Amino acid sequence: MSPDSKKPELVLTRVFDAPRRLVFEAWTKAEHVSHWFAPRPLTMARCEVDFRPGGAFRFVMHAPDGTDYPFEGAFREIVPPERIVFTGTVHEGNVAVTTVTFVEHEGKTTLTMKQTFTIESDATRGAKQGWTMTLDQLGEHLTKL
């Protein structure tokens, strides 16, 4: 939890062996996002991305047991290829604000993801594990581009 905001907060950093331009692009188009933006074993059953400030995204993550997990939100700020800020409703009014930054050094990209939530819940307590698996899949996807 951040001491100044008093809201639950998660910060993860990952280094990808790919140029910033490519890592950033993987966040911008449904044809990329649909391959990696769901922690295993979930798959992306629906993926719509209107990548512009004020644009919406709508995802439905599908579990092996047949359960669907919808997630939607909007892009607040986009600074190519440096930063993306988006909001999304996790459940029952719990809003997540996510800031993703991209820094390139010697052909590799350091991605930092900071997420704050309105309230703490089971979903926010599981966010670190979910994001870790999701970023693993992003890394795998980047090797195919």
Image (spheres, rainbow, N blue to C red):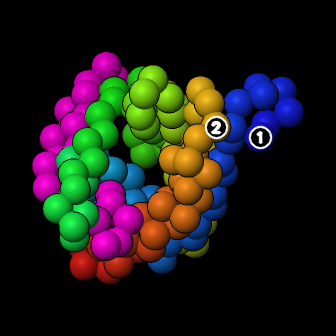
Residue picked out by circle 1: 1
Q: What percent of the width, then of the height, locates residue 128?
A: 59, 59
Instruction: Give neighbour class at mark 1: few <14, some 14-19, many 20+ (Cα, 10 Å).
Output: few
Q: Quadrant of the N terminus?
A: top right
Q: Does residue 47 show up magenta in the picture?
A: yes
Residue for point 34% across, 27% down: 74
Q: What percent of the width, then of the height, locates residue 142?
A: 33, 72
Residue for point 51% across, 33% down: 96
Q: Is residue 134 visible?
A: yes
Nearer to me, 42 or 106: 42
Residue 26 vertical position relative to residue 74 in the rendered view, above or below: below
Q: Does residue 143 show up magenta in the picture?
A: no
Q: Amino acid at mark 2?
A: Glu
Dot placed on the residue nearer the N-terminal end, 1 or 2: 1
Residue for point 48% across, 77% down: 17
Nearer to me, 4 or 141: 4
**Helix, strand or loop at mark 1:** loop
State which region is magenta: 34-59
Q: Is residue 135 visible?
A: no
Q: What percent of the width, then of the height, locates residue 40?
A: 35, 71
Residue for point 79% across, 37% down: 2
Q: Amino acid at mark 1?
A: Met
Nearer to me, 100 or 22: 100
**Helix, strand or loop at mark 2:** loop
Which residue ends up furthest to the right in the rendered image? 3
Residue picked out by circle 2: 120
Q: Quadrant of residue 50?
A: top left
